[in-house]
Image: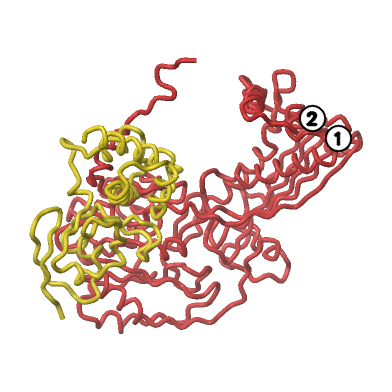
Amino acid sequence: MNFSEIGKPRPRFEGIDQVTGKSTYVGDMYLPGMLYAKGLLSTEDHAKILEIDTSPAKQLKGVRVVITGHDIPVNITGPIVQDAYCLPIDKVRYRGEMIALVAADTEEIAEEAVSRIKVKYERLPAVFDPRDALQPDAPIVHDEFQGTLCNGNLILMHGHDVSRLVHGDVEQGFAESDLIVEHTFATTPELGGAIEPYAVLAQPNGADGLTIWAPSQSPFANAGAIAKILQLSTNKVRFISPAVGGAFGQKAGYFEPVVALAALKTDRPVRYTFTSKEFFLHGSSRSPMYLTYKMGVKSDGKIMAIQRTTLTSAGAQASVGILITHKGGFMGAGPYYSPNHYAECRVAYTNKVPGGAVRGFGMAQATFAMESMMDIIAEKLGMDPLEFRLKNVLCDCNNCSPTGENMKSIGIRPCLEKVREMSGWQA
Amino acid sequence: MKTTICFRLNGEEMEIAVEPNLTLLDMLRERLHITSPKKSCDEGDCGACTVLLNGKAVNSCLVLALSVNGQEVMTLEGLGNAQNLHPLQKHFYEMGGSQCGYCTPGMIMAAKAFLDENPNPTEEEVKEGLSGNLCRCTGYIKPIKATLAAAKEINEGK
């Protein structure tokens, strides 16, 4: 088949800039009088902060400002629920959490100043696994939000402990099945691994407020958060997302408000460029999940029931973990038809770096579990795994999704058939 | 204590005083504001900072600025510009060899050093030649094809 556009390279709009080295990423920007920022990152997983002594850092020549949580006008933020401290005051909840920020004449001075800040911690027991986090004696990550944002470590989703999806009757489906298979899968917290580490540049503009440059995927949400945190009116915060050196969901804003405050306090531009190590420590990862899938099938391969229980580790902040848990819940049965569905999804705080979107929003975890189940069941049935899938894909006759939508233009069958033909697949 | 060094950067004589621990990458970026060499891992793993030192590809984060005294350094800025693209730049542009663009300067410079040494490579050799440059967007296929297309164009032009 001949297409006018498909299969033909389309030069990128910014391609010439990229191949000539003219694309400007935040780390490439230098403003007159610009200061360099560095953050002090927690070396503890979970600890009370007894004291932060910034005076040795402040005494260092070339240090222009040292900021701690006490300096932040409204020290709480978060994309869905407000549970993230710009800089924590009372305790740290994960290793890599930023506690203080220094802006200095050079990056070397800022690094030296950070190393001179003395933090007295009182180590607390930490919890890393979301299953452990739900035990009655588990260390509590957020004591201050009990009953409002969480019960124990279980994060409330629109006020509920659990997000449930019910369609048909799985118990009846299992009763009618010839084979029932159950497995629990665990996924890991992958990083997007963008080659450009995160960076923020903030420039104070006097009465005009601030301009902030960061490779963010959420510039408008970030601008709103900065305005709220610094108590500025939103028209005083201009947020520019210039060239972004790969994001994959991981660049939705990190420490812009703190860098912006440093710029306001010094009345000079301030840039913070993460090292790769800092980005790996502090950057959000794909939220790890436990997924228990139980499926019932007829001996001819027809799926009768899909029951799923998932538990997400949000890390120390809910961040977008609530949405990821929901989405993994309602999309987790994949492109397959079953007359009966039941899903129960939970999300828990842990003393880990807050999770987030990474190339997908809860679906990667759920798809891994579902497709693994499809292979396991096909093997138990002695069926070709492709045949087993073709027998169960949503189609015009069985087009009802687990959420009750009647799907249209379902392309999965012709797609799988084409792949079978082109790959020469033989069971 | 600073030492003054002289070197050629993209064909021009440079003179600059540098500290003994300053890397070539930091000198180019922070002192001279030559920003096509990118800083990512800063320990020689990713290749984003690749420049040519006397025609050979090096990770500029692993080269001390002092050591380029009397040497010849070339960055992507010296390879070509929008009006006069080098064949590698042209084919990376036309064939989708760049996506986010962050690894692109290092990758093109690595490809340049590679083609200078091996003007008529096989696809396998190109893969080996670019193996020191990490990319998270393209999946490498298009940079490899662009490098092969550039090799062809350079050879036909001779």
**If you read the primary sequence from the N terminus, does the residue marked by circle 1 or circle 2 appear first?**
1
Asked whether residue B104 is in view, the answer is: yes
Are the residues tagged 1 and 2 within 8 Å (C-beta)?
Answer: yes
Q: Which residue is mark 2?
A: A339
Q: Which chain is red?
A: A
Query: Which chain is yellow in the picture?
Result: B
Query: For the residue labelled by badge 2, is the local secondary structure a helix, a strand or a loop?
Result: loop
Residue A81 at x, y = what percent?
Answer: 52, 52
Q: Which chain does the residue under circle 1 lie in?
A: A
Q: Is residue B67 above or below residue A257?
A: below
Residue A262 quadrant? bottom left
Q: At which x and y percent is residue B94? A: 31, 32
Helix, strand or loop at label 1? It is helix
Q: Who's the residue at 18% across and 54% down the image?
A: A205
**Residue depicted at 20% across the width and 61% down the height:** B28
- How much space separates mark 1 and mark 2, taking CA atoms? 8 Å
**Toward which corner of the image does residue A113 lie, by quadrant?**
bottom left
Residue named by callout 1: A173
The image quadrant that residue A204 belongs to is bottom left
What amino acid is at disc 1?
A: Gly
* Residue drawn where x is 26% and y is 40% of the image: B89
Q: Is residue B142 left or right of residue A233?
A: right
